[in-house]
Amino acid sequence: MRKSKKPDWQQKIAKERIDILFNLANKEFKKHPERSRRYVELARKIGLRYNVRFTRTLKRKFCKNCNSLLKPGISAKLRLDSKTKVIVIRCLNCNKTYRHPY
Ligand SMILES: [Zn+2]
């Protein structure tokens, strides 16, 4: 069954909410990591419900496994593999690795 598309105005509001939630997640990240993860989780749920796709940059900002924000040097380790041309990002919260070609 084809997913029904939500009206544009609803998607617009959803996008704004996602933006707000990511801002909050960023703000709370240092003091309240659990709260920060909760905001990311909420943002993802809104995205799913309203068929709002996360941009490539937004997708790389959090861990899909534990919803933690991926901050290089703080919550994530970044490694460049020049041979295979991939960026390897490891979440320091749950140890999951992500590979992105560059
Ligand atoms: Zn993680």
Image: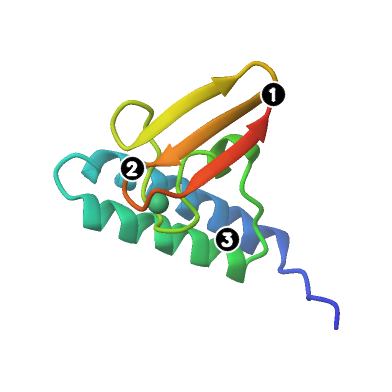
Q: Which residue is mark 2?
A: 92
- Tell me if mark 1 has few (under 14), some (14-19) or many (20+) residues whose alpha carbon lies within 10 angstroms of its own: few
* Residue 80 left/right relative to 2: left
Q: Secondary structure at mark 1?
A: loop
Circles 3, 2 touching at the beta carbon (< 8 Å): no
Query: Measuring 65% from the left and 16% from the top, which residue is drawn there?
Result: 82
Query: In the rendering, at what x and y percent does residue 60 appear?
Result: 54, 39
Question: Which label was assigned to residue 102?
Answer: 1
Q: Nearer the viewer, mark 1 or mark 3?
A: 1
What is the CA distance from the residue labelled 1 to the residue labelled 2? 22 Å
Q: Nearer the viewer, residue 77 or 38?
A: 77
The N terminus lies in quadrant = bottom right
Q: Give residue 8's mark.
A: none
Where is residue 9? Give x, y as percent.
65, 59
Q: Give the mark nearest the N terminus, 1 or 2.
A: 2
Query: How far is the residue under mark 3 from the one under mark 2?
Result: 25 Å
Indicate yes or no: mark 3 CB to ligand 1 under 8 Å: no
3 or 2: tag closer to the N-terminus: 3
Q: Answer above or below: position of 32 versus 47.
A: above
How many angstroms separate mark 1 from mark 3 (CA)? 26 Å
Tell which circle, 1 or 3, labels the residue nearer the N-terminal end.
3
How crowded is the residue under tag 2: few (<14 C-alpha within 10 Å), some, or many (20+)? Answer: some
> As drawn, which residue projects farthest toward the right?
1
Does the Cβ of the disc 2 residue fall within 8 Å of ligand 1? yes
Left or right of residue 40: residue 51? right
Residue 90 point in image, percent of width and height:
44, 39
Residue type beneath disc 3 = Gly
User: Which residue type carries mark 2?
Assistant: Leu
